[in-house]
Amino acid sequence: MTTILERYVELHPGSARLHERAARVFPDGVMHDLRFAQPFPIYVERAAGSRKWDVDGHEIVDFVMGHGALLLGHEHPAVVDAVAAQLALGTHYGASHELEVRWGEMVQRLVPSVEHLRFTSSGTEATMMALRLARAHTGREKILRLREHFHGWNDSVTGQPSAEETVPRSPGLPLGILDASIVIDQNDIDGLERTMREEGNEIAAMIFEGTGLHWGTDPIDIDYVRRARELTREHGVVLIFDEVITGFRVSEGGAQLAYGITPDMTTMAKIVAGGLPGGCVGGRAEIIDQIAMRGGGKRIAHPGTFNANPLSAAAGAACLAIIGNGVPQQEASAKAKMLAQRLNAVFREEGIAGAVYGQASMLQIALGMEE
Ligand code: PMP
């Protein structure tokens, strides 16, 4: 009998060949940690709607959807048309343009915490800028994070501060940065209260993922979020919701609109740019406006060659125009719920230990556990 692995290798000779070349150029032959697969990942040739096709001609139902960037699926006609129209007009002006204004106004209108914003090229840049803004605003250095919450790969949010942690200190990071991190457990209100009591006046920002660690693999309690909002306000700590995944997905205004809890700052990427590269940091005007040129040299610089580049602005504005009424999110969430129910029924019928669960249109599959 052939194993699943043998069958995989047999079915994907084109991908195997490409991976051989890739492995001579890139570490592990891939461009993103999550694309690492053994013995090799598949190579995709094109995508449309809910599907993508690999170089060996297989049609694949795509549940990854651009790492969460594609709420409308691949090649949505409105996004394709907007990008094509912009392509004919220029891909980079190195100057301001109307589309970036329209795009920014949409984000400002949809996301409750956003009074002012800046576009970036990625979510990693957005969280990097958010933390810098918070440190400058408060004059404090420490960042309070929740264990296993992911915020991209910038220095301030990578690795664990103590060698005793289960996840080791990340190599390559200055120890000072790790020492300025406090990592506590999500949903432990007592722990949060203690940390705030003991170190609150040294903490610049508290940052967490909108729906809990790894896009809600372990969901965050609403009571915890509410308490975090109260305590950060009390201690003058800037509260940052990292809505890179949950933004525009959990609702048209992200998790914060669904909760009715407004942070001081929000980081966004993925859906905000309609499937092209892009990110955004937004929040209270007095915090974001530290970027503004107002003399005295006390400002935070924000260059970035591709900030609000015209193609991302075109895709982002086209996407937000469609999803701004919240209807596509509701449809996606309903489909995800149906998929979870059916998969759980299959698990039960087949006697498979595991469960499918999630929030909005984000699904998790847990295998190998009884309940
Ligand atoms: N924050 C969260 C919650 C994320 O999920 C990600 C990416 N998956 C990032 C930040 C980083 O975004 P990017 O990959 O655009 O740098």
Image: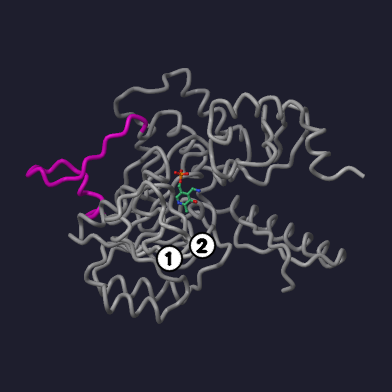
Of residue 30 and residue 58, the one placed in the foreground of this image is: 30
| Residue 213, numbered circle | 2
- The reply to whether the residue tagged 1 has its Cβ within 8 angstroms of ligand 1 is no
The answer to which image quadrant residue 188 occupies is bottom left
Indicate the amino acid at tag 1. Leu
Magenta stretch: give its range: 285-306
Relative placement, left or right, of 251 versus 99 is right
Q: In the figure, 97 relative to 155: above or below?
A: above
Residue occupying the point 71% across, 29% down: 16
Measured as percent of width and height from the top left, residue 42 is found at 69, 34
Measured as percent of width and height from the top left, residue 89 is found at 43, 19
Residue occupying the point 79% across, 38% down: 8
Q: Is residue 138 magenta?
A: no
Indicate the amino acid at tag 2. Leu
The answer to which image quadrant residue 348 occupies is bottom right
Relative placement, left or right, of 111 versus 57 is left
User: Badge 1, how many Cα within 10 Å: few under 14, some, many 20+?
Assistant: many
**Residue at label 1?**
146
Measured as percent of width and height from the top left, residue 242 is found at 42, 56
Q: In the figure, 283 relative to 235: above or below?
A: above
Q: State how many labels appear.
A: 2
Helix, strand, or loop for circle 2? helix
Residues at marks 2 and 1, CA–CA distance in whole angstroms: 8 Å
